[in-house]
Amino acid sequence: MKFGYFCNTTNWKKKPFVKILDETREIAIYCDQNKWDSIWFTEHHFNHEGMETCTNPLMMCADVASRTKNIRLGQACNTITFHNPIRLAEDIATLDQMSKGRVEVGIGRGVYGREAVHMNKEADLKDQGKNFRLFAETLEIIKKSWTEDFFSHDGEFYKYPSENFVWQHDMSPPIDGVVEKKTNVLKKISVLPKPYQNPHPPISQVVDGERSIQWAAENGIKTLMWIPTVKALKKRFEIYRDAKSKAENRDVPLGEGISLVRDMFVAETMEEAKKLAGEHIVNYMRWVCHWRGLGNHMDPGEELPQTKNKLDLLNYDFLHERNLLFGTPDYVASKIKELQKELNLQSLQVWSNFPGVDHQACMRSIKLFTEEVMPKIKSVEVNIQRAS
């Protein structure tokens, strides 16, 4: 199994931002030195509350790239509907060159209306159909930028090159098919640099609904999932497997192409894990579930009791049995083994720096996970390989 650290930087306690950066660097350097496979940064905007404070995952990845040697650098995600596709393609390719091919590209459509409408009015989440079309077109342009020496594009939102743009320069001899010889009108453009990885870095889409899962599978894109129970994830994993199998005309094994994010806090006792981080993960989930409700936390067909407010049931005990990796190393390892058994999970991302968690407590959790959980999983995998 591959292990990644999901570094959703937060600042509930209103620390100086430079302190957040220093703490993030400590996490990244530790993970790199202790053979974690990847680290992932998020993109969120206008979050004065402090629940999510990373506005530019590519800049965070660039900073971490300069301080590490091996760990892969992911974004979970770049909200591509917020960005000019060519500029984003350039920035990602530049990072891939700077890190000599350590980039994992995460993409998404956005979940918060406050962000979307202010970053790009065309991405307004009130019109989901339009938002999806913008997402698909943006990704198409990004991939063209990486894989074609010269390209053109004529879509709903973008047109490249700009119509009737004349280009003539003595040091830029016209290339057949790129510039019209008689009029010097530009017909194609070239985006540089190209990525270090050929043809481009791996792409993963943050997905939740069935439509997004199927679309990712049909378009050769890996997926990132978060929150649901094991039973609910099983259905999502099967949807992805079946759609990918059909698209690629092969029997895709369950779990291939999927990375799961889980909220994790490891301590010497179950009680200590709850004491140090329980309140903080509940507060964070109240933030998330304000929009989503509790649907993502429910098993298929499950009906919850009626309450006055939709989040009245949201507490530590409700979350813990459903999707938290909170507890002793043995307990957390057992829950990961369950994910492997039921889902054939091959890639897991975890995080402990929830809003309000003390940084030293977070680092202790990460170290316990590294030293006492990861070896338990890897030893089981070695034994399975030997038996086969």
Image (cartoon, grey):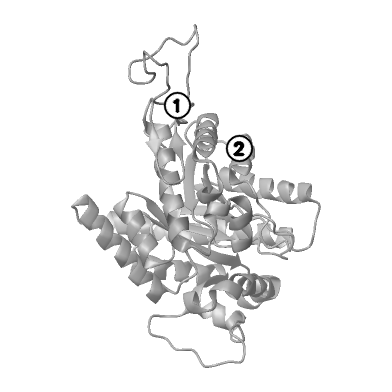
359 with respect to 71 (left or right): right
Which one is nearer the viewer's eye here, 12 or 288? 288
Name the amino acid, label 1: Asn
Mark 2 lies on a secondary structure that is helix
* Figure quadrant of the N terminus: bottom left
Residue designated by label 2: 62
- The answer to whether one can see residue 349 in this image is yes
- The answer to whether one can see residue 1 in this image is no
Name the amino acid, label 2: Ala
Q: Where residue 159 appears, x then y in whole percent? A: 44, 37
Mark before the other along the chain sequence, 1 or 2 = 2
Which residue sits at x=37%, y=18%? 180
Q: Where residue 24 appears, x then y in whole percent? A: 67, 49
The residue positioned farthest toward the left in the image shown = 249
Residue designated by label 1: 164
User: Where is 77 relative to 185, above or below?
Assistant: below
20 with respect to 254 (left or right): right
Which residue sits at x=64%, y=71%? 287
Label number found at residue 287: none
Which one is nearer the viewer's eye here, 119 or 387? 119
Q: Of the residues tagged 1 and 2, which is closer to the observer? A: 1
Q: Where residue 271 appears, x then y in whole percent? A: 65, 78
Q: Where residue 292 appears, x then y in whole percent? A: 54, 73
Which one is nearer the viewer's eye here, 54 or 317? 54
Which one is nearer the viewer's eye here, 154 or 380? 154
Question: Dot 1, crowdedness within 10 Å: few (<14), some or many (≥20)?
Answer: few
Which residue sits at x=49%, y=6%? 170
